[in-house]
Image (cartoon, rainbow, N blue to C red):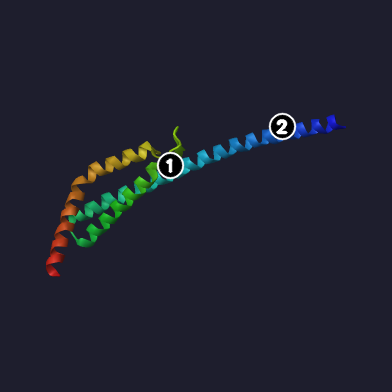
Amino acid sequence: MDKISAVHINEMLSKIESQNKKTDVKASQFISKFQDIQSQHVREHLEGLYEKIVKQSEKIGEKLHLSEVVRYKNLVREFLDVAVKNSHKFSKQNFLDRRGRHRVYCIVKKVDRELEALTKEFLTQEVDRINVLKRLDDIRGMLFDTFM
């Protein structure tokens, strides 16, 4: 009787282990697919923001109005915020070295190289406009200081 129950238990354990392996594979596939979809969504969002920034910069070129400049600055800020938050992954690891001292390692990993390349391309194209906006903001600040 003991041999029979031991055989049944071993069979059940092997079935459970094989099901766990299948579940782990499915979970890792799901996570991978989810990350791909999320990365694609972020890329599309950034491309949309980039198009809005280009249109807004054209508006500023046509007529230099403060509300248009503020809208441009907000679009650039949002673009950079989304790009930075989604292009790098921060992880923190705690270790004890050989002497028993506590060490903390912070690691920043590049998650999406294409996203980083898009951000760099955007910055190189928009540097002149950003410098103009900075000067406009400085002038506005000086005028405000004079007024107060």
Q: CA distance from mark 2 to mark 1?
A: 36 Å
Q: Residue furthest right?
A: 1
Looking at the image, residue 118 sits to the left or right of residue 18; the answer is left
Is residue 79 or residue 111 the one in the foreground?
111
Residue drawn at (25%, 54%), measured in percent from left and top?
56
Q: Position of residue 44 (x, y in %)?
A: 39, 45
Question: Is 58 located above or below residue 104 in the figure?
Answer: below
Q: Which mark is residue 14?
A: 2
Q: Position of residue 137 (x, y in %)?
A: 18, 58
Looking at the image, residue 93 sits to the left or right of residue 75; the answer is right
Q: Amino acid under label 2?
A: Ser
Q: Residue furthest front?
A: 99
SS under mark 2: helix
Q: Position of residue 130 (x, y in %)?
A: 21, 50
Tell me the quarter of the image containing the N terminus: top right
Q: Amino acid under label 1?
A: Ser
Tell me the quarter of the image containing the C terminus: bottom left
Question: Is 77 located above or below residue 91 in the figure?
Answer: below
Mark 1, Cα crowd under 10 Å, few <14 / some 14-19 / many 20+, is few
Q: Which mark is residue 50?
A: none
Q: Quadrant of residue 115?
A: top left
The residue wearing badge 1 is 91
Q: How many marks?
A: 2
Residue drawn at (43%, 38%), measured in percent from left and top?
101
Query: Which marked residue is nearer to the observer: mark 2 or mark 1?
Result: 1
Q: Position of residue 132 (x, y in %)?
A: 17, 52
Residue drawn at (43%, 42%), measured in percent from left and top?
92
Question: Is 144 located above or below residue 52 in the figure?
Answer: below
